[in-house]
Amino acid sequence: MWQFLLNLFKKKSPQDEQDTMKKYLIVGLGNIGEKYANTRHNIGFKILDHFASQENFIFETQKLGDVATYKLKGRTFIFLKPSTYMNLSGKAVVYWLTKENIPLENMLVVTDDLNLPFGSIRVKTKGSDGGHNGLKDIQEKLNTTVYNRFRFGISDAFNKGQQVDYVLGEWTDEENKNLKERLDKSIELIKSFALAGINITMNTFNGK
């Protein structure tokens, strides 16, 4: 973490500054392993995998995660699926922010949200972890709650005491029918984040 903080204050050349501002870290949260692949809690992984399938790039296993690079209109996207398991996601986030020299404002964390209806979208620039262990660890490792997050609604359609089973459960047939359109919308959102900026993205996609 200290290296990341030092990099924030390190003097850079104008060219370095320009290159840095065109790089973006897109972090999809989830748990590694086939048994988690189609669970609600893994929507961050699923969105990044859908992006890769639509744009024909592949992930490679690297330090602390599966990583892919994608270029669009002069921007470089670094996609990260942490391999640290959900509750240690911050370790991978700090490592790749530092390694790729990406400013914190150019990071977007993609995560599930129980407090939103299925498929609904909310992009925010700051906020609490909302009880989400992945966001909690990222917040602790970065020592700030000010970072961009894209929350994808999974709803709270579970009985009392069944939250863990619900988030680690698989999508229903009805949800799967509607998921493709929501995944396509998520790709549009991520592209907008880098090309149009966070404020326009929030205005365009929140509640859609």
Image (cartoon, helix red, strand yellow):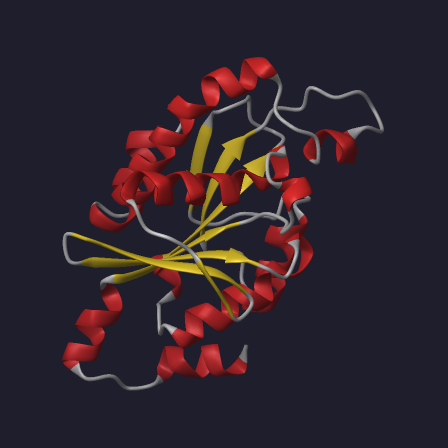
In the rendered image, residue 149, in percent from the top left (x then y), is placed at: 46, 47
Residue 204 sits in which quadrant?
Answer: top left
In the rendered image, residue 58, in percent from the top left (x then y), is placed at: 38, 53
Is residue 143 visible from the viewing direction of this image?
no
At horizontal 83% and vertical 24% (from top left) the residue drawn is 160
Q: Give above or below for 157 relative to 105.
A: above
Residue 47 sits in which quadrant?
Answer: top left
The answer to which of 113 and 48 lies nearer the viewer is 48
At horizontal 35% and vertical 67% (from top left) the residue drawn is 103
Q: Give above or below for 196 relative to 103.
A: above
Q: In the image, is 136 to the left or to the right of 15?
A: right
In the rendered image, residue 120, in percent from the top left (x then y), is placed at: 47, 25
The answer to which of 55 and 144 lies nearer the viewer is 55
Q: Which of the image's four quarters has the C terminus? A: top left
At horizontal 38% and vertical 35% (from top left) the residue drawn is 186
The answer to which of 152 and 207 lies nearer the viewer is 152
